[in-house]
Amino acid sequence: MSPFDSYADKCHHLRMERRNCILQITLHSDGQTLRWGSGPHAEFGPAFRDIGADPDNKVIIMTGIGDAFIEAVDSSNVGKRLPTSEMSPRTWNHIYWNAKQLLMNLLEIKVPMIAAVNGPVSIHAELGPTSDSRSGGPKESSIVRARQRCNPAPGRHLTCNALPPDSGWAQSYT
């Protein structure tokens, strides 16, 4: 069994296809635009770790499905975590740990990564800018939507503030 076979089907919210050492990962929720929640939040960190550890991955393309790259939070997927005023310190710690693993494992991928952002991003908008190369379609409004809908998370506000002012990402955030 190759390393790819051991992780390719582990994640419900990532479809992975590899040809000629080029891995395409497609973010989705049941074949539709990804709606963020506890599933993607817990799955992406370990997935990025597995992807980065596979020596047969030479280039990675990350994209989405539908009219947005990532849509709003799916509260049915978050469950009893909302409202935040009722969340325990243990729950916050779990969310923090997953978020840290997601970002750190993404940054540890040592091969070129291309983000083909297919539309607006309302949650975890740092996924596009942290890639080595980014492209967006005409409907991409990226981080501006994220800022309007939720507080900046550690990954998003650190990433976006570090971007050059002439990048479309940084301008849409500020």
Image (tube, rainbow, N blue to C red):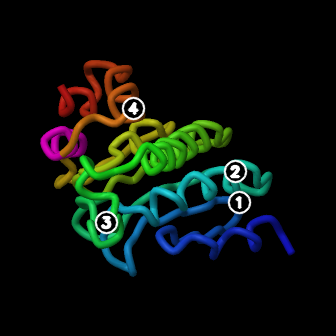
Q: Residue furthest bottom?
A: 30
Closer to us: mark 3 or mark 2?
Answer: 3
Return the disc, 3 or 4, that comes first in the chain's sequence: 3
Q: Amino acid at mark 4?
A: Pro
- Image point (48%, 40%), residue name: 131
Q: Is-magenta flag for residue 112?
A: no
Closer to us: mark 4 or mark 1?
Answer: 4
For label 2, the residue is 58
The secondary structure type at the circle numbered 2 is loop
Q: Nearer the viewer, residue 116 or 64?
A: 64
Closer to us: mark 4 or mark 2?
Answer: 4
Q: Amino acid at mark 3?
A: Arg
Pointer 2 local density, CA inside 10 Å: few below 14, some 14–19, many at least 20: some
Looking at the rendering, which quadrant does residue 31 occupy? bottom left
- For the C terminus, which image quadrant? top left
- Image point (45%, 62%), residue name: 40
For label 1, the residue is 21
**Distance between mark 4 and mark 2 Cα atoms:** 29 Å
For label 4, the residue is 154
Q: Are marks 1 and 2 in contact (CB under 8 Å)?
A: yes
The span picked out in magenta is 142-149
- Image point (55%, 63%), residue name: 24
Q: Are marks 3 and 1 in contact (CB under 8 Å)?
A: no
Closer to us: mark 3 or mark 4?
Answer: 4
Return the disc, 3 or 1, that comes first in the chain's sequence: 1
Pointer 4 local density, CA inside 10 Å: few below 14, some 14–19, many at least 20: some
